[in-house]
């Protein structure tokens, strides 16, 4: 077994043309207009929350996501927090999501004073399972005058927040049907899935709102940043207002009409993002080529490499393999990391961390299975 892992490690090194040096899991590439646009932003003196690059990236992102509107935010977590607020999530209410996700998904719920309900994922997508949502609502849901309530907790269930794990889209058609039946708005945590599509439509454009992240490890980066996308003009206007301190536009007077947030993406970061977005297609193509090399290699060596499902395209943000047991997973993690090839297990279920251990959850059968077996392998654009 160790021998075949050595072969796999060599293959990854070969794919990156790095016979010896450390290979990170995902590193950004700055090969376009990054320095030019950053210098330009500095020369303009507009480095903060107002500037031409902020407007420009919002235009580019509404094009990429095929939505009417885009509102840039200081990071993805803040974007999800505000998107949830836009669909009416309030203190003491509940939001349905998955436990197999990055912690930001649940934190964004908590930042609204709301409570996550953790439901299972599908084995094939690794994202929120429409069947799990349906089963939960059939058992605990009750439609009342102003929405669906959880009979067990007596709290209103205000939204559903699916996450497209590693850029593989969830079963959106089925999930939308379930959520429509129960009158639940969807906010897509598309932080990992910029460039992924479901039936030829970009992820992020299916929910009432969707949110992307541009953290340093994502497909494209602004250093730190995020964006809310939506087709709803009034929600977009409200999201922009509340993320820019709720200031009423005026040439010199400072009047604010509610307690807002300082969540706007700085123009300096937007300049970097603008140059990165220009290269998105190049990055996506490069990652697909790597995925296809991995697929050929892993299928020969009998290891399950995860590929996109029918009727979807994945952005292959973080590529992953599924090992047979937790023990095998641990052996591979240890062999690869000690050989300078960075690999990482999928997240531990959020229900295991102290902050979320008392939240309502279902059996987590699929999530636990994947937690024990999925490992990310180096996935940078080359
Ligand atoms: C990256 C990420 C976010 C947002 O992260 P930020 O670092 O705040 O931009 C949210 N959810 C998931 C699943 C992510 O991977």
Image (spheres, grey):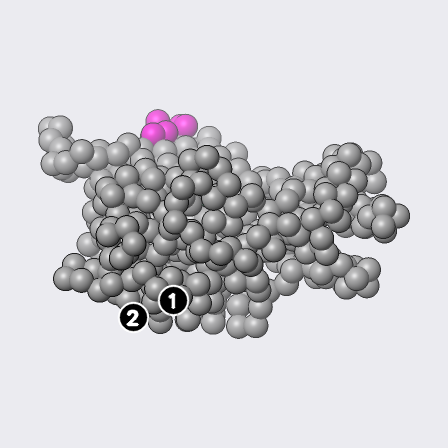
Query: Which residue: 54% across, 54% down?
Result: 367
Q: Which residue is mark 2?
A: 181
In the image, the residue with mark 1 has its CB under 8 Å from the nearest atom of ligand 1: no
Q: CB under 8 Å between callouts 2 and 1?
A: yes
Query: Which residue: 82% across, 60% down?
Result: 301
Q: How many numbered callouts? A: 2
Label 2 vs label 1: CA separation? 9 Å
Left or right placement of residue 345 versus residue 249 in this view: right
SS at badge 2: helix
Nearest the viewer among 339 and 75 is 339
Q: Which residue is mark 1?
A: 134
The range drawn in magenta is 42-48
Left or right placement of residue 71 versus residue 145 in this view: right
In the image, the residue with mark 2 has its CB under 8 Å from the nearest atom of ligand 1: no
| Residue 45 screen position, x and y as percent | 35, 27
Asked if the stretch drawn in magenta spans residue 112, the answer is: no
Mark 2 vs 1, N-terminal side: 1
């Amino acid at each position: 077994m160790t021998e075949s892992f050595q072969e796999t490690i060599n293959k990854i090194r070969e794919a990156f043309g790095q016979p010896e040096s450390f290979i990170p899991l995902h590193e950004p590439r700055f090969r376009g207009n990054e320095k030019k646009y950053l210098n330009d932003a500095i020369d303009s003196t507009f480095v903060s929350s107002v500037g031409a690059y902020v407007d420009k990236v919002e235009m580019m992102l509404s094009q990429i996501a095929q939505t009417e509107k885009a509102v840039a935010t200081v990071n993805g977590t803040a974007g999800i927090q505000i998107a949830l607020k836009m669909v009416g999530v309030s203190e003491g209410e509940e939001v349905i999501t998955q436990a197999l996700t990055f912690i930001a998904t649940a934190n964004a719920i908590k930042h609204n004073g709301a409570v996550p309900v953790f439901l299972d994922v599908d084995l094939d997508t690794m994202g929120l399972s429409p069947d799990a949502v349906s089963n939960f609502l059939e058992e605990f849901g009750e439609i009342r005058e102003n929405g669906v309530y959880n009979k067990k907790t007596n709290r209103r269930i205000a939204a559903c927040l699916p996450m497209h794990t590693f850029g593989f889209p969830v079963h959106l058609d089925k999930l939308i049907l379930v959520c429509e039946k129960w009158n639940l708005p969807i906010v897509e945590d598309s932080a990992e899935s910029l460039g992924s599509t479901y039936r030829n439509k970009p992820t992020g454009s299916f929910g009432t709102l969707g949110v992307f992240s541009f953290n340093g490890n994502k497909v494209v980066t602004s250093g730190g940043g995020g964006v809310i996308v939506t087709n709803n003009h009034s929600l977009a206007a409200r999201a922009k207002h509340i993320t820019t301190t709720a200031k009423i536009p005026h040439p010199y007077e400072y009047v604010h009409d509610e307690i807002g947030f300082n969540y706007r993406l700085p123009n300096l970061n937007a300049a970097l993002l603008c140059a990165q977005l220009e290269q998105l297609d190049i990055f996506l193509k490069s990652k697909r080529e790597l995925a296809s090399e991995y697929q050929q290699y892993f299928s020969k060596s009998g290891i399950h490499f995860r590929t996109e499902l029918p009727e979807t395209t994945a952005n292959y943000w973080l590529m992953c393999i599924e090992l047979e047991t937790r023990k095998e997973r641990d052996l591979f993690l240890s062999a690869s990391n000690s050989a300078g090839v960075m690999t990482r297990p999928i997240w531990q279920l959020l229900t295991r961390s102290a902050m979320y251990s008392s939240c309502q959850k279902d059996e987590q059968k699929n999530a636990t299975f994947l937690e024990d077996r999925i490992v990310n392998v180096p996935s940078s654009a080359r």
